Image: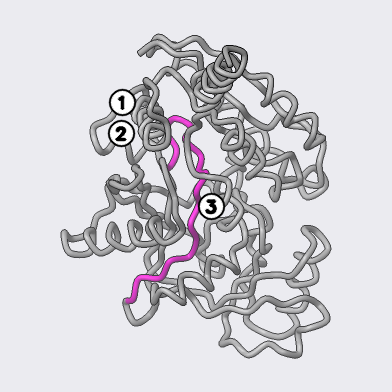
């Protein structure tokens, strides 16, 4: 079906990430935009690109002006303000324009790593023990070392580096202070799990499938903590980048693979994810699989995470993007009785016109 599709994304701009040397993650969205645009053109759709920059109201005005059948949502929040990530799906939901990926409520919840862990624990899904600390509450620390210290509300491994894993009070205090100064708010401190690390992408809405599982394999020199740092993702000259490999499909038995997939699917459903999301997991020393994070807006660039897993499932990149589009339309069809090329906003406009005509006739 031929459609008008808008690719909405955050326009890279100067931000707090510049001073921390983390600009490259911001620029990464442009790779995804270009790849998705090529795929959608191959699928026969008309494409417009809509980059968004602050302010919130200006962005909402641009979204209200859209005349499209679908928005392919690649918006990750304004640069340096990840808490604005939910802006686009929230606005599109109000406008009745179908969009790819998760609802705004899910993006908002999942960005808060502390909230996600509370939800997981309440549902009985294993996740490492944790505390939310700041420089003034360090005296309340009661976890077992080693621990990993993270920003509470960042993604793309912002704030994760070789010093993030701490094994004594002095290093803990230093890292919590660094996170507080660089990213604001409290620091998520959780007991560090050093077992095998997996992630899986879930595709679907009420019915969902789990793509082939990936394993993160570390070949790091002694003394370097086995974690997926910012450098491992974005800095090719770093030992972390060079000595961190992804194996997909993961070399695990059928039973282990099913357990990883079931855990990913449970977390996906628990948070209310739709369309697609990635779940990161790690084994603890007892062999229990712990959910580390749920990412409802993962990178879908070619040859990265989700796209790599789609390829392992036998999908070309174009087919992967087509599936994401189909899921967005499927989600829309539950609320919209009109044909697939008619959005809920168009349906409301038609209804308003009909009502106006009825009143005039009376």
Asked whether, in this view, residue 82 is left or right of residue 290, the answer is: right
Point out the tag, 2 or 1, that comes first from the N-terminus: 2
Residue 144 percent coordinates (x, y): 56, 87
Residue 162 percent coordinates (x, y): 63, 63
SS state under label 2: helix
- Distance, label 3 to label 1, CA atoms, is 28 Å
Label 3 packing within 10 angstroms: few (<14), some (14-19), many (20+): some
- Distance, label 3 to label 2, CA atoms, is 26 Å
Give the numbered dot on residue 106.
3
Q: Nearer the viewer, residue 74 or 159?
A: 74
Pick out the residue farthest to the front. Answer: 362
In which quadrant of the rendered view does residue 77 lie? Answer: top right
Q: Is residue 6 visible?
A: no
- Distance, label 2 to label 1, CA atoms, is 6 Å
Scheme by which the image is coloured = one colour
Magenta stretch, residue numbers: 288-305
């Amino acid at each position: 079906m031929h459609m008008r599709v808008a690719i909405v994304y955050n326009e890279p701009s100067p931000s707090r990430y510049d001073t921390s040397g983390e600009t490259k993650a911001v620029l990464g969205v442009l790779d995804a935009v270009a790849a998705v645009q090529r795929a959608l053109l191959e699928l026969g759709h008309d494409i417009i690109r809509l980059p968004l920059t602050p302010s919130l109201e200006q962005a909402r005005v641009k979204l209200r002006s859209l005349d499209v059948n679908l928005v392919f949502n690649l918006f990750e929040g304004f640069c340096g303000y990840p808490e604005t990530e939910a802006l686009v799906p929230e606005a599109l939901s109000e406008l009745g324009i179908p969009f790819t990926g998760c609802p705004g409520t899910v993006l908002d919840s999942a960005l808060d790593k502390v909230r996600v862990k509370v939800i997981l624990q309440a549902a009985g899904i294993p996740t490492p023990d944790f505390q939310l600390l700041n420089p003034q509450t360090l005296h309340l620390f009661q976890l077992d070392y080693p621990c990993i210290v993270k920003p509470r509300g960042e993604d793309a491994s912002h704030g994760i580096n070789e010093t993030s894993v701490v094994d004594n009070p002095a290093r803990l205090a230093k890292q919590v202070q660094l996170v507080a100064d660089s990213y604001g708010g409290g620091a998520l401190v959780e007991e560090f799990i050093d077992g095998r690390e997996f992630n899986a992408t879930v595709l679907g809405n009420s019915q969902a499938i789990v793509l082939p599982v990936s394993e993160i394999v570390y070949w790091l020199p002694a003394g370097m903590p086995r974690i997926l740092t910012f450098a491992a993702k974005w800095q090719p000259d770093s030992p972390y980048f060079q000595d961190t490999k992804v194996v997909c499909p993961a070399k695990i038995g059928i039973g282990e693979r099913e357990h990883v997939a079931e855990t990913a699917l449970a977390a996906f459903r628990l948070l209310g994810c739709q369309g697609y999301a990635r779940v990161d997991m790690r084994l603890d020393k007892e062999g229990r699989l712990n959910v580390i994070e749920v990412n409802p807006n993962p990178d879908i660039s070619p040859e990265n995470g989700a796209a790599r897993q789609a390829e392992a499932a036998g999908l070309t990149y174009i087919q992967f993007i087509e599936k994401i589009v189909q899921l967005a339309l499927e989600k829309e069809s539950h609320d919209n009785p009109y044909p697939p090329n008619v959005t809920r906003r168009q349906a409301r406009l038609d209804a308003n016109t009909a009502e106006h005509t009825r009143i005039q006739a009376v």
